[in-house]
Amino acid sequence: MTAQFDINQVYQQFPALQQNCNGQPLVYLDSAATAQKPLVVIETIQQYYSGHNANVHRGSHSLTASATAKFEQARQTVQQFIHAQHSCEIIWTRGATEALNLIAQTYARQTLQPGDEILVSELEHHANIVPWQIVAEQTGANVVKIPMLPDCTLDMDAFHQLLTNKTKIVAIAHITNVTGTRNPIEAITTAAHHYNAVVVVDGAQGIVHEAVDVQKLDADFYVFSGHKLYAPAGIGVLYGKKALLEAMPPWHGGGKMVEKVSFSGTTFSALPGKFEAGTPNVAGSLALATAIEWLESLDRHGAEKHIAQLRQKAIEGISEIDDLRIIGLQEHASIFSFVVDGVHHQDIATLLDQQGIALRAGHHCAHPMLDALGLTGTLRVSLALYNTEQDVERFIAALHKACSLL
Ligand SMILES: *Cc1c(COP(=O)(O)O)cnc(C)c1O
């Protein structure tokens, strides 16, 4: 039985939140850029380097054996967390970006023929656009945009019309980072599989706010970063269906990804080693597993309810501001974007920062989406389970003050 979600108890576990920023207690509303880390995650890194540091899958001493066991246990923790069928379907990467580039440069580069199509939604982060443009250039395939509707949801009618026998890959975010739009992944995989296209799901935001079951979603690939999930930066996950991963050529060459090397030819390791050349970020993997265990020890339903209440309060509190527009407001999203007509987003962000409020201003690495909205940037509030009612009250007051000064 998990205890009921207790915000005070959770808040206390985040040392970075207990600091002042410009002379005021920090209000951190930028968790979609990167989340703060609970003490248990920080301690995992410290303990690893204090007592367990050794290279993995190499050597024969006890320290390396124990580090290897922990490293593989962490892989299983991720496997169970996303309900993958096999632990070898979990490939460690540096993050979502690296995972998407890996898929583009192995699966896509080997498979795509001139004239083939990669459908990419207009709501994507640059990390889920640019790797496809690069591989399209290399193979003669074309990147085709799936447009969004004015309410910042995906145009599913257009998607169905764009799907043809030329479609080989569909690249789509689970939850987007500008408006928190949730894309209907199951409907997308069902339709795409009808045309034998594979679906690459960018889960950088989705993993944080959904209980992910990759088998239920029927995602061919699902990627995410540790640092948005309360774990450190520099560690991330590529999930792929085993049959696909097995058929893919390796990407980086080096140690551990090979079975046997000679100058007459090299044979590659089995999964997951084939995609993990070089010494991995062992501390990062262990810390990601700790973050997952910590999340699972919480009442996640209670946490989501808590975030939903904060969001409601924030939106109500800022809606009265003259000329303030919330962009593509999505139900149940922990993220929302807004602009104040006639005032530059960066000016507001600066005035908020002076009052200790950290949020994101800019294009959020999603130029095509902002172009479609006719905007150069927005202010983005992203809530995490450690935010408090007081954070939201301070944000509302600070925004009222900023707007009255501009
Ligand atoms: C943050 C983010 C990425 C990129 O993640 P990195 O950790 O920078 O690799 C990709 N997609 C979305 C939706 C994101 O929010």
Image (tube, rainbow, N blue to C red):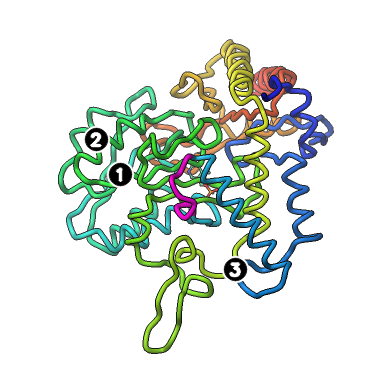
Percent of width and height locating residue 346: 60, 35
Tell me what residue is drawn at x 63 percent, y 47 percent: 288
Tell me what residue is drawn at x 63 percent, y 62 percent: 68
Q: Extreme left residue here?
A: 165
Percent of width and height locating residue 41: 72, 45
Residue 140 among those drawn in magenta: no
First in sequence: mark 2 vs mark 1: 1
First in sequence: mark 2 vs mark 3: 3
- Is the residue 248 above or below the residue 350 in the image? below
Q: Quadrant of the N terminus?
A: top right
First in sequence: mark 1 vs mark 3: 3
- Determine which residue is flagged by label 3: 57
The image quarter containing residue 106 is bottom left
Tell me what residue is drawn at x 30 percent, y 44 percent: 170
| Gap in angstroms between the C-alphas marked 1 and 3 | 35 Å
Mark 2 residue type: Ala
SS category of the residue bearing label 2: helix
- Determine which residue is flagged by label 2: 191
| Gap in angstroms between the C-alphas marked 2 and 1 | 10 Å
Residue range of the region highlighted in magenta in the rendering: 83-90
| Gap in angstroms between the C-alphas marked 2 and 3 | 41 Å
Q: Which mark is residue 170?
A: 1
Q: Is residue 125 left or right of residue 7?
A: left
- Residue 405 shows in this picture: no
Tell me what residue is drawn at x 38 percent, y 31 percent: 183
SS category of the residue bearing label 1: strand
Percent of width and height locating residue 121: 34, 39
Question: For mark 2, does the 10 Å Cα neighbourhood hold few (<14), some (14 to 19), or many (20 or more) residues?
Answer: some
Question: For mark 1, does the 10 Å Cα neighbourhood hold few (<14), some (14 to 19), or many (20 or more) residues?
Answer: many
Q: Which mark is residue 116?
A: none
SS category of the residue bearing label 3: loop
Percent of width and height locating residue 326: 50, 21
